[in-house]
Amino acid sequence: MSRLPVNAVIGLSRAELSEALLPLQIERYRAGQIFDWLHKKRVSSYEEMSNLPAQLRRTLAEDMPFSYPEAVSRRESEKDGTVKYLLSYPDGALVESVLMHYRHGTSLCLSSQVGCRMACRFCASGILGKERNLLAGEMLEEVYAVSALEGERLSNIVIMGTGEPLDNYDEVVRFVRRVTDPEGNGLGGRQVALSTCGIVPNILRLAEEKLPLALALSLHAVRDSLRHELMPGTRAWTVRETVEAMRSYAILTGRRVTFEYILIRGLNDTEEDAQELARLIRGIPHLVNLIPVNPVAERGFCRPDAAETAAFKKMLEKCGINVTIRREMGSDVEGACGQLRRRRMEKLKAGPST
Ligand code: SAH
């Protein structure tokens, strides 16, 4: 039996890898070679590590196995070139990753869990619940596999795909350290962002981690009753507590935080909502990102039109708020916010005839 779970090896730092190799009693420099094969040359099997003895390659494959996820499907948006991948891990777990092209570079929207247990009512990712967490190594493989398939280096990573990253705290923190590790992947810390539905104790923990990470909160409602109805996974905390945790994050890290706010016609888009939002976040270095709600067939929420969205933006600006409207990407490949879903999984569950 292997000593490490499948794909855990990719989530190890250079020092941790050296330590994990100690029982094999191999030359010390081998650890550096293996680390470079994994993270610089990014090979997808030990077989390809041509400067290692064959016996060592076989031992490694048994002791610390890894296997890149396979691309089950690739859909490219005709509107904006956004590419949505469905990736399959060796245990059959399916996750989606979305690649977006901007003028400033290429951004990957990454999944942190297989499914999600937060059950936000407007979001397709939670419809089937959570299957399991992803390991840090598996998230790195999402990055490596998609950039290899596309032949592109990524300039930004946003942990905003399927899953609640702060519900998979340890592995997500490990992932952020590894993906920004100058010895490994080496992505600049300014280029990694994480969005959470607001698991308050973990926002406070994250603030102490000294991580190079931009943090966003999915706020979406300013009244407890509405927020708890829309986002049942957040019922343990009030809106105020959640926003105050974000204030602490901004103070402790010295970084501006983002508040995401889905606009749903008739539910959270009144003048009182705008004023209360402004009052709540007063004094926090912030950006408010408005997202007109995307259609999810089962949900039936109404999205405001462009004029209504602009009017809400204006109301916030009148209160001194920095606000942008999220540019929608990949809607025609169901890659837009909240549309990620395991459609193939649903098909499998529905039976072979569909
Ligand atoms: N669990 C994390 C990250 C995943 S969702 C979180 O809650 O932040 C990424 C963003 O898409 C979140 O802001 C989420 O609230 C938003 N989103 C979900 N469903 C949506 C929909 N139907 N329309 C627009 N945005 C949606």
Image (tube, rainbow, N blue to C red):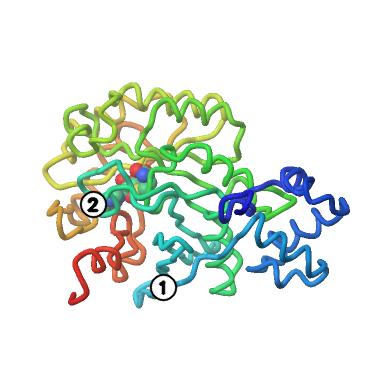
In terms of image quadrants, where is residue 80? bottom left
Whether residue 21 is situated above or below residue 340 in the rendered picture: above
Q: Residues within 10 Å of mark 2 (few under 14, many from 20)?
A: some
Residue located 29% across and 26% down the image = 239
Q: Secondary structure at mark 1?
A: strand
* Residue 201 percent location from the top left of the image: 43, 25
Q: Nearer the viewer, residue 277 or 94?
A: 94
Whether residue 232 is situated above or below residue 78 in the rendered picture: above
Disc 1 marks which residue? Answer: 72
- State the quadrant of the N terminus: bottom right
* Residue 334 percent location from the top left of the image: 30, 66
In terms of image quadrants, where is residue 15? top right
The amino acid beneath tag 2 is: Ile
**Does the image show residue 26?**
yes
Q: Residues within 10 Å of mark 1 (few under 14, many from 20)?
A: some
Residue located 72% across and 60% down the image = 59
Whether residue 56 is situated above or below residue 122 in the rendered picture: below
Residue located 16% across and 60% down the image = 297
| Image position of 166 (left or right of 315) | right
Mark toward the start of the polypeptide (2 vs 1): 1
Q: Ligand 1 near label 2 (Cβ, under 8 Å)?
A: no
> On residue 127, which mark appears?
2
| Image position of 185 (left or right of 114) | right
* Residue 229 percent location from the top left of the image: 17, 35
Q: Nearer the viewer, residue 282 or 52?
A: 52
